[in-house]
Image: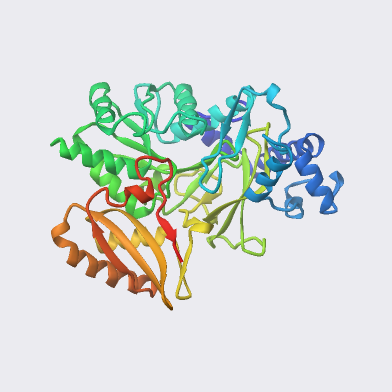
Amino acid sequence: MDEYPWRKRDVYDYFSRPAEDLDADLQRRFMATIDLAWERIPFFRKKWTEAGLTPADIRSTADLHKLPTTTIHDMRASIESAPPYGEHWAVGPEDCDSVMTTGGTTGFPRPVLVTREDIGRITDIGARIWSMAGVGRGDVAQVMATYSTHGAAWIAHWGLQRVGALIVPASSGVATPTVRQLDFIERFGVTTAYCTATYARILAEASEARGIDPRDLGIRKFVGLGEILSPSKREALETTWNAKAYDLYGTMETLAWSSVDCEASRESHGALGMHIWSDSQIIEILDENGEPCAPGEYGDLTFTSWVSLAGPKVRYRMGDRAALVTDPCPCGLNTPRLLPLAGRVDDMLRIRSQNIWPAAIEDTLRRAAPEVGDWIAVAERRGPREVLTLHVETTALELSEDISERVVREFKAATGVKPEVSVVPIGGTAERSGAGKVLKARRIFDDR
C-alpha cells in the first residue's frame, strides 16, 4: 500500500498531494527504472548504447525523449536472438513465480515472466481499478475471462481478492457455456461482471431467450476488458442490463491496468477519459514521426512502465491509437486521462483515400441502426474498385432493407465512403470475428 495505494480514498489522497511532491515521487520511480534497465537488462543497454547514449544522459523524465522507442518487432527479435524468453528481462526464469503470455492479437503470443514481487504490485493496481468502480466486500464478482497463460483473468482475480469481493471464477464462454454462466449469475447473486462488451451482449441474448429480462438478474456493474468500449456500446450495455459500465485499459506487455473511468467519466459514457495511474507509468502519444501529439490529438499510445520490475517497458509503442488530456476532471482526481481509443493502428482501413477506424464504424452503426448487434467490416478489391462491406447482425431480419439503407446513408455522411451492407442473423459474424470464443474479437478484415 505504501508503493501503490489501492483504496479509493487513499488513491484520491495520493493524487491530491502537492504537484512538486508527486513529481519528486515520479522522478524517483522513473530513475530507478532507468538505472535497472542500464544495469540488468541487456536489451536496453544494447539499444541505448547503439543510439549513442550513456547513463549520464538520462537524469529525469525531461530526458525521456532522448531514448529510442521500442515495438513488438523489437520484442520478437529479442526472443529470436535469445529464446525462449529474450533479453528484455531483469531476471531469469529461475527467479520468477510464473510465465504468462501476451494475447497474441498480432502474431504468436510472447512470454511474460512474472516474479512474486511483481504480483504484489499488479494486485494493488488491479485492486485500485475495482475500488474506483466501487467494488468491494459484499459484492459477488463473476470473472468471465479465460484463466490461462494470458493474465486478464488472473489480474482481475488478484485485485478482487484484495478488495474483499466474493469471486465466481467462471472463466470465459469457451470454458463455461453461456447457459451455465447465467446459472451462476442467478444462483450466486452476482453483482459485478468482468467480461467483454461483446460477451455481455451474448449473455443478454441468452437471458432473453430464456424469457428473463437481463435487468432482473441483479448485475449492477460491468467492468470491460479486451475491447474498445465505444460511447454508444457503453450506453447500449447500460440500458440492456440497467447497470453501470466502467472501461479500463491494460496490457500484458506492462502487466498493468493503466487507467479506468471515474464516476464522472462513466456518466458521460467515457467522454472525459480514463484516469492514468501516473505513479506506475508514463504515457506518451506520438505521431508517425515519433513527435509528441498535442493534447486531445490521436496518435500511437506509448508506455514507460515499472509495475513489472522483471520486465519494465521504456517507450514501448503499443500500436493502439489514443489521445491524452490533462485538463481538470470534475471528479477531482488529478491525473492525466486517456480518451476513448480509436482502435489499433494496424486496424485502420484506408478506403478511397479515407481513414476509417473501428470506433467510428461502431458509433455510426449505433446511430443508424440501434437494433444491430455484432458486426465486421471487410475491405476487398473487385477489379479496379475498392469495396467496403459491413456485415451486421440483427434479430430484426424483416427490417434488413431498411437497416441497410439507414447504415449506408449514415456511414457515407460520416466517412465519405458508401459501403455495401450485408444483414445477417445473430451469430452470423462470429465464425470470422471469434466473438464469444476469443478475448479480443476481431472486427476489421482487409482482404485486398
Of 155 and 191, nearer the camera is 155
What quarter of the picture does the N terminus occupy?
A: top right
Give the left or right position of residue 109, taking residue 166 as reference: right
Of 233 and 59, nearer the camera is 233
At horizontal 52% and vertical 36% (from top left) the residue drawn is 12
Answer yes or no: is residue 327 visible.
yes
At horizontal 79% and vertical 39% (from top left) the residue drawn is 42
Q: Is residue 313 above or below residue 411?
A: above
Residue 238 in percent (x, y) is at 29, 44
Residue 55 in percent (x, y) is at 84, 44
Give the left or right position of residue 231, taking residue 239 as reference: right
Residue 259 in percent (x, y) is at 51, 42
Give the left or right position of residue 332, taking residue 318 as reference: left
Q: Is residue 146 above or below residue 441?
A: above
Residue 78 in percent (x, y) is at 71, 43
At horizontal 76% and vertical 43% (from top left) the residue drawn is 44
Give the left or right position of residue 314, taking residue 266 as reference: right
The quadrant holding residue 377 is: bottom left
The quadrant holding residue 241 is: top left
Residue lying furthest bottom in this view? Answer: 384
The quadrant holding residue 142 is: top left
Of 52 and 399, nearer the camera is 399
Q: How is the protein colored in the picture?
A: rainbow
Answer yes or no: is residue 234 visible.
no
Give the total number of marks visible in the rendering.
0
At horizontal 73% and vertical 51% (from top left) the residue drawn is 64
